Amino acid sequence: MVDEDDLSDVLWQAPAPRYVTSLRLNVMLVHSPFLAVLALVFRAGNIPFAFNVVLLLGAMLLASFVWFGLFWSSKRAMHLKYRVRHLDINLVKGYLFRHDVSVSFNRIQHIEVSQNPIERLFELGTLRVFTAGTFGSDLHLPGLPNSVAHKLKAEILSAINLEEPSDEGSVAG
């Protein structure tokens, strides 16, 4: 029997501080092509109507860039935490909409560590835990240092492999 006090002592962990920078770089890369197109249209636009449309789109794009690049990125990272306990892994995330996922080790199908090019630049990784449940029961833990993501993967796999297989349904009897 597992003591409840042992499970509650596990501290919540936060993503790496570099995660905010990687989110901001993602926002910049998404907004850059649109800003470049607006700049070209602004230079070529001789019609007053086009000028007004370009100014409106530019203002909306700038507001979006400020919101997602400066405010949302830091809030997203600040409201992301996880913990790995003896029998499960928990993830809490979300600034406006809270999302709390707990995955029991006996439900895990497979685990992987993935990196996109920006995560690779900042030596970050995303731990992806896939379960036997329905849509939304999988767990994606972004913003981990790559070494920590691989270490967590190994720890979870070793905990899963230590579980004794059940004798139910065994043909050997």
Image: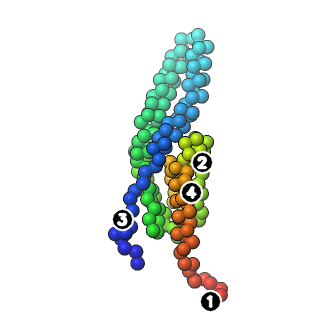
Q: Which label's residue is closer to the chain start, 1 or 4?
A: 4
Q: Is residue 3 above or below residue 10?
A: below
Residue mark closest to the camera, 3 vs 4:
4
Q: CA distance from mark 1 to mark 4?
A: 38 Å
- Residue designated by label 3: 8
- Check disc 2: other Cα within 10 Å, few if <14, some if 14-19, many if 20+: some
Residue at 48% x, 31% y is 65
- Nearer the observer: mark 4 or 2; the answer is 4
The x, y position of residue 89, in whole percent, is 47, 62
Chain-order first, disc 4 or disc 2: 2
Q: Residues within 10 Å of mark 3 (few under 14, many from 20)?
A: few
Quickly name the residue at label 2. Answer: 115
* SS label for mark 2: loop
Residue 129 can be seen, yes or no: no
Tell me the quarter of the image containing the C terminus.
bottom right
Q: Which mark is residue 150?
A: 4
Q: Earlier in the sequence, mark 3 or mark 4?
A: 3
Residue 61 image point, x, y percent: 50, 27
When asked about the image quadrant of residue 75, the answer is: top left
The residues tagged by marks 1 and 2 sit, at their Cα atoms, a distance apart of 45 Å
User: In front: 11, or 66?
Assistant: 11
Determine whether 143 is above or below 102 in the image. above
Residue 105 or 40: which is nearer the viewer?
105
Element class at badge 4: helix
Residue marked by disc 1: 173
Q: Earlier in the sequence, mark 3 or mark 1?
A: 3
Q: Residue furthest left?
A: 5
Question: Which residue shows up at 57% across the image and 19% down it?
Answer: 39
Question: Disc 3 versus disc 1: distance between alpha carbons?
Answer: 39 Å
| Mark 2: amino acid | Gln
